[in-house]
Image (tube, helix red, strand yellow):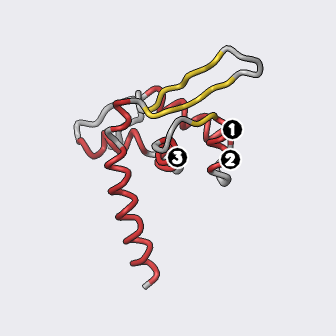
Amino acid sequence: MPVSKKEVSPCPIDAMLSVIDGRWKGTILWRLSEGPLRTSELRRSIPDMTERMLIRHLHELVEDGIIIRVQKKTTPQQVRYSISEYGRTLVPVLETICSWGRIHLQHKKL
């Protein structure tokens, strides 16, 4: 029986995948690994993603403690996202996933 997003699976792989699960979360984290970005900068850097999906994924990543949302009290409002210290522990995992993805893409071309 599948585990809902609200439940934490006792399986470490399922627990990790529940955090980065989603079509764009890996890409968002990859972009933020290079430094903090405003919402509009993230949106422009991932042109195929809708704004609604970006906001949804950002909210989930903030909720999981993977990224930090900083809102400046300016007009217009400025919001920046960055990877938290805890979220930085995912960067080596993302690098490994990216490396395997390159291998897989080459394999699919054969």
- Estimate the spatial distance between the alpha carbons at disc 1 and disc 3, rounded to whole Å: 13 Å
User: In the image, what residue type sits under mark 2?
Assistant: Arg
On screen, residue 13 versus residue 64, left or right, reads: left
Badge 3 is on which residue?
Answer: 31
Furthest toward the bottom, the residue is 110
Of the residues shown, which amino acid type is indicated by label 3? Answer: Arg
In this view, 92 is above or below 5: below
Q: Toward which corner of the image does residue 76 lie, by quadrant?
A: top right
Label of residue 106 in the image? none
What is the distance, in whole Å, between disc 3 and disc 2 at their CAs? 11 Å
Q: Earlier in the sequence, mark 3 or mark 2?
A: 3
Q: Residue at x 45, y 43 (%)?
A: 33
* Image quadrant where residue 38 sits: top right
The correct choice, above or below, for 26 with respect to 56 in the image is: below
- Establish if 6 lies above or below 21: above
Give x and y (percent) for residue 80.
59, 29
SS for dot 3: helix
Rounded to the nearest angstrom, the CA distance separating label 2 from label 1 is: 6 Å
Instruction: Name the quadrant of the C terminus.
Output: bottom left
Disc 2 designates what residue? 44
Check if mark 2's residue and mark 1's residue have beta carbons within 8 Å: yes
Q: Secondary structure at mark 2?
A: helix
Amino acid on which the number 1 mark rests in the picture: Ser
Which of the pair 92/23 is nearer the observer?
Answer: 92
Q: Residue at x 36, y 37 (%)?
A: 88
Residue that carries the numbered disc 1 in the rendered image:
40
